[in-house]
Image (cartoon, helix red, strand yellow):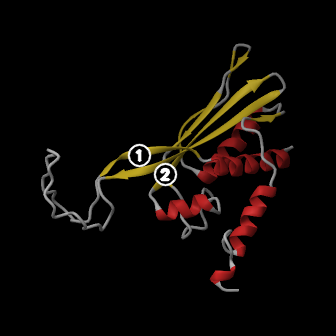
């Protein structure tokens, strides 16, 4: 089969991956977990999150008096996995992985564990951000033009191909990675019972 026979929907492999992703059940976020032992639950959550991200801050569920407190995990913002990094779990196959290969993308996760009447609610939020650069890397078009916008430009020491990061542009939530993490956590919790 050649490229011209793929049709408007892309190559058959990509279609198969998309079909498999659509056939998987979508889990609720926050996920309701009927668990009695909060320590086992917390250890499973930390172990799952650690497979995807490095943890920056962790506030476990605690019993204060007669009240259970909310648990919270914040991760370090990390560069998203590309197609060339298949061993990383944060690289969900499909559009997200291709996008991270072609753009500078980073992700950061927040996990909240709220005690409810019959167990716990686990909410996973993965923030996705695009790097904001002063110019594309290795771009030389327009570098010698005179600027009339009043900006101050100074020569910078170092490599002429260094790029200056102006910050990160929020792109919203990465729902596919959230769902992958919820599925992994749900599987671990069902195995722990």
Q: Earlier in the sequence, mark 2 or mark 1?
A: 2
Quarter of the C terminus within the rendering: top right
Q: Is residue 152 left or right of residue 164?
A: left
On the image, numbered disc 1 is attached to which residue?
168
Q: What residue appears at the point 77 percent right and 63 percent down from the top-left corner? A: 19
Separation of marks 2 and 1 at Cα, in angstroms: 9 Å
Image spot of residue 65 (x, y percent): 70, 13
Please tell me how crowded label 1 is: few (under 14), some (14-19), or many (20+) other residues with Cα within 10 Å.
Answer: some
Q: Regarding mark 2 in the picture, which secondary structure is present there?
A: strand
The vertical placement of 188 against 5, above or below, is above
Crowd class of label 2 (few under 14; some 14 to 19; many from 20; radius 10 Å): many
Q: Nearer the viewer, residue 171 or 77?
A: 171
Residue 21 position in % (x across, y down): 75, 58
Question: Which label was assigned to residue 101?
Answer: none
In the image, what residue occupies the spot 64% across and 82% down?
Answer: 4
Where residue 97 appears, as percent x and y from the top left, is 58, 61
Q: Is residue 70 above or below residue 99?
A: above
Estimate the x, y position of residue 57 in percent, counting from the top left. 53, 37
The residue that appears at 64% across and 59% down in the rendered structure is: 92
Q: Quadrant of residue 119?
A: top right
Question: For the image shown, how many numbered marks are present on the structure?
Answer: 2
Q: Quadrant of residue 61?
A: top right
The answer to whether the residues at label 2 and label 1 have Cβ atoms under 8 Å apart is: yes
Which corner quadrant holds the N terminus?
bottom right
Q: Residue furthest bottom?
A: 1
Task: Check disc 2 and report the residue beneath it.
Answer: 106
- Between 86 and 70, the one nearer to me in the picture: 86
User: Which is in the foreground here, disc 2 or disc 1?
Assistant: 1
Q: Tell which residue pokes out farthest to the right in this image.
A: 193
Quick check: 187 left or right of 160? right
Circle 1: element type: strand
Q: Nearer the viewer, residue 45 or 165?
A: 165
């Amino acid at each position: 089969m050649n490229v011209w026979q793929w049709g408007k929907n892309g190559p058959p492999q990509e279609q198969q991956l998309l079909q498999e992703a659509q056939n998987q059940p979508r889990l609720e976020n926050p996920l309701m977990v009927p668990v009695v032992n909060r320590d086992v639950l917390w250890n499973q959550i930390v172990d799952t999150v650690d497979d995807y991200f490095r943890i920056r801050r962790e506030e476990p569920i605690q019993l204060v008096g007669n009240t259970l407190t909310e648990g919270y995990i914040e991760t370090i913002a990390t560069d998203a996995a590309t197609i060339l990094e298949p061993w990383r779990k944060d690289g969900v196959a499909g559009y997200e992985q291709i996008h991270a290969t072609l753009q500078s993308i980073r992700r950061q996760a927040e996990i909240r564990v709220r005690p409810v009447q019959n167990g716990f609610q686990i909410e996973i939020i993965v923030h996705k951000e695009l790097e904001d650069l002063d110019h594309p890397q290795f771009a030389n078009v327009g570098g010698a033009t005179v600027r009339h916008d009043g900006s101050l430009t100074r020569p910078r020491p170092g490599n002429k191909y260094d790029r200056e990061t102006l910050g990160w542009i929020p792109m919203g939530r990465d729902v596919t990675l959230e769902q992958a993490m919820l599925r992994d956590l749900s599987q671990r919790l069902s195995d722990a019972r």
